[in-house]
Image (tube, rainbow, N blue to C red):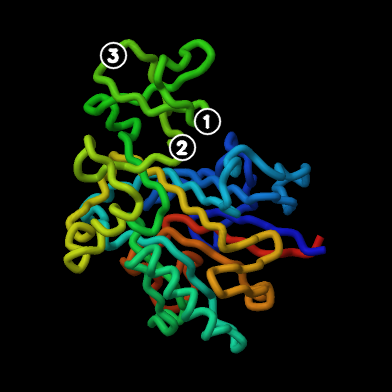
Amino acid sequence: MPKLRVSVGPDRFHQIIARVNDIGKPTEIDTPLFAGRVLVYVKDFCGVTPDGTPPVTDCSYFDGRSRKFGILIEGRFKAREGIEPYTGDEVQFGSDFDFLPPSFPRGPFKVGMKIARMVDPATSFEENPPNGRPYIMSPYLGAMNTICAYPSPAALPRAVLIAHHDAAHPHEAGEARLGGFVPIEELEGSKRVQKNPWRFLGDSTFAFVDPEHPRSVAQRRKHFVVDSGKNRKDFVYDPEIVYTTSFFTNWYDLNSLQLKMGPVNLDISDFFDAMPIRYALRSTRLAPKPDVTPGPMEEETFCTIAFDLVDD
């Protein structure tokens, strides 16, 4: 019986099998464009592991939640001499495809796109881009269900600090527990600071405009789509800030590649027998293909997450 394989890497040509549902072992990524890590959750995971050990079938991430899988991305977009930082309009997240098979269900797909745009109004689809690789994309600022930001290690001396809590440094009264890590804001204070303070923040919503009035997910998406995306175009990703995001949905059962999205109910395994379901964090800036083979320019890629079924 086919098993789910989850692969993560900086681009589609350089991926490794990920450790699913293992919060202690995310996939690290470090390229000239991006430094970060990716963690993937899959409910009832019974698929392939990197070393053949039994899979972690489930975890507390799914407790009380209807979602079927989750992708957590944490990292920063690196500064490069002579190159402007990325804007909110340039960094995108979504799915890209090697091709669309002749049997691609365009009718149900159009219905699905209408539902997707109700959730995220900035979602776009291009069937025939110049490089021949169709995609469904949305600006990263709106595509993700949650998004947080905090200073990278290099920025800590001039920024608020983030404390790590453990048995020797327990939570204080009133602080919420988020998988062992809690965001604590303090000026050079008494809290011990992790040498490498990167960690996942959980389902918090980063307040982009007014920290005293955090925005809901819907409000954040609206903020970055109004006025033809003016706020999104004005937003600049700081190379010294780590952005932590999560994307999740209850539409896909990835263990069997079943899609249920409103009135759309499909077995999509036949459409992805020759390519994986792939999610990509990328920019709209073009660059040579990551495998340096001849071909049209492609969008710069920061990381990819691929799901496919392989024979046991």
Residue 305 occupies quadrant: bottom right
Position of residue 189 in the picture relative to residue 137 (left or right): left
**Quick one: 298 or 47, which is closer to the camera?**
47
As displayed, is residue 75 above or below residue 10? above
Residue kind at label 1, given as amino acid type:
Gly
| Numbered disc 1: secondary structure | loop
Q: Earlier in the sequence, mark 2 or mark 1?
A: 1
How far, Cα to Cα, is label 3 from label 1? 23 Å
Residue sitting at x 47%, y 53%: 247
Residue 104 percent across, percent down from the top left: 58, 84
How far, Cα to Cα, is label 2 from label 1? 8 Å
How far, Cα to Cα, is label 2 from label 3? 22 Å
Residue kind at label 2, given as amino acid type:
Phe
Residue at the disc numbered 3:
189
As displayed, is residue 209 above or below residue 257? above
Residue at the disc numbered 1:
179
Q: Earlier in the sequence, mark 3 or mark 1?
A: 1
How busy is the neighbourhood of tag 1: few (under 14 within 10 Å), some, or many (20 plus)? few
Residue sitting at x 41%, y 15%: 173
Q: Earlier in the sequence, mark 2 or mark 3?
A: 3
As displayed, is residue 226 above or below residue 131? above
**Quick one: 264 or 15, which is closer to the camera?**
264
Residue sitting at x 61%, y 68%: 259
Position of residue 252 in the picture relative to residue 56 (left or right): left
Asked if the residue under mark 3 is in contact with the one under mark 2, i.e. CB atoms within 8 Å, the reply is no
Position of residue 228 in the picture relative to residue 153 (left or right): left
Q: Nearer the viewer, mark 2 or mark 1?
A: 1
Residue at the disc numbered 2:
200
